[in-house]
Amino acid sequence: MSFTLEQLRGFVAVAEEGNFGRAAARLRITQPPLSRQVQKLERALEVELLVRTPRAVLLTPAGEAFLPEARRMLSLAAAAPITARNAARGTSGTLRIGFTAISALTVLGTWIRTIAQHLPSVELTLTEMVSRDQIDALLAGDIHVGLARGVPASEVLETRRVHAESLILACPRGHALAELGRPPSLVDISSHDVVNYAPVAARYLQELVISCFHGAGVEPRYVQQVGQVHSLLALVDAGVGVGLVPRSAARLRLPNLAFTEIAGLRPDIVETHCVWRSAHNNPALESLLRLTEPAP
């Protein structure tokens, strides 16, 4: 079965006008080539689409069924070049974004609003995953860009810092560290049970917390290890210990949680990077990177 767009346009025009002469005038052609187009279409479909009567041209049952499909095919054909041009310009297409739970509270919302405003035809797929899994997903082609921490140096990946924040202390309400009348130091904190991060699932935060305490010359007692910041907060809320969390985690309120500053820590110690494949061929990703590029 083979037919052309011209044959579809001819059939639709005749069906809508009910007359070959008016349809030919609408298409700015003469009537004989229009009749040949419709006949070729009928031969390709192996059905009769139109019936001539003295007063009008009528649709057969097959023609009635085929008319909406013909209109749909013509609409798709008209939209296809626009879709292709938009995809090439990066204003349409798809973006698969991986993100950590905490980056959802900081960077991701801004990205979603930017895409909605400037790239409304881009289809988004958002997947929460830890940083390590994001790297694997990028290398496998399962996501286009990630919002991650502790991204290893690689010849195939590019990174850009998109957010930096401090570490603060999460502790149960009424805890001694929250009642000092001043921000506790790492030395103060080290005398209490500390919930830390798991070395595989949350390697970046685990190493950061350990290095902070080492830098202060102290070694706390780590009582539990977790893979996610919200899991650490749940344990602190339950009274298991205290924990160091990114400042943005203070937005995650639980009934028994209190947050306090930590004396002596850099304000930009926790970094979030966006990471993508150097050799990607996704114009929509290029548009997002351009739109979110920091001002010089």
Image (cartoon, rainbow, N blue to C red):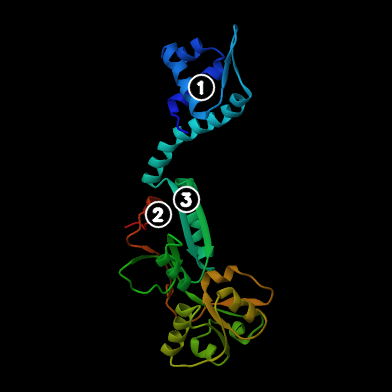
Q: Position of residue 38 (x, y in %)?
A: 48, 20
Type of amino acid under label 2:
Leu
**Residue 11 bears which disc, if any?**
1
Q: Horizontal placement of 196 versus 36: left or right?
A: right
For marks 2 and 3, give the one nearer the viewer.
Answer: 2
Q: Residue at x 51, y 78 (%)?
A: 201
Task: In this rendered view, identify the residue nearer to me: 149 or 241.
Answer: 149
Q: Residue at x 48, y 83 (%)?
A: 199
Q: Residue at x 51, y 24 (%)?
A: 42
Task: In this rendered view, identify the residue nearer to me: 151 or 195.
Answer: 151
For marks 1 and 2, give the one nearer the viewer.
Answer: 1
Q: Earlier in the sequence, mark 1 or mark 2?
A: 1
Against 140, is 50 above or below?
above
The residue carrying mark 3 is 115
Q: Earlier in the sequence, mark 1 or mark 3?
A: 1
Against 163, is 11 above or below?
above
Helix, strand or loop under label 2: helix
Task: In this rendered view, identify the residue nearer to me: 270 or 179.
Answer: 270
Q: CA distance from mark 2 to mark 3?
A: 10 Å
Q: CA distance from mark 1 to mark 2?
A: 41 Å
Instruction: Count neighbours of disc 1 (C-alpha within 10 A) and say few if under 14, some if 14 to 19, many if 20 or more.
Output: many
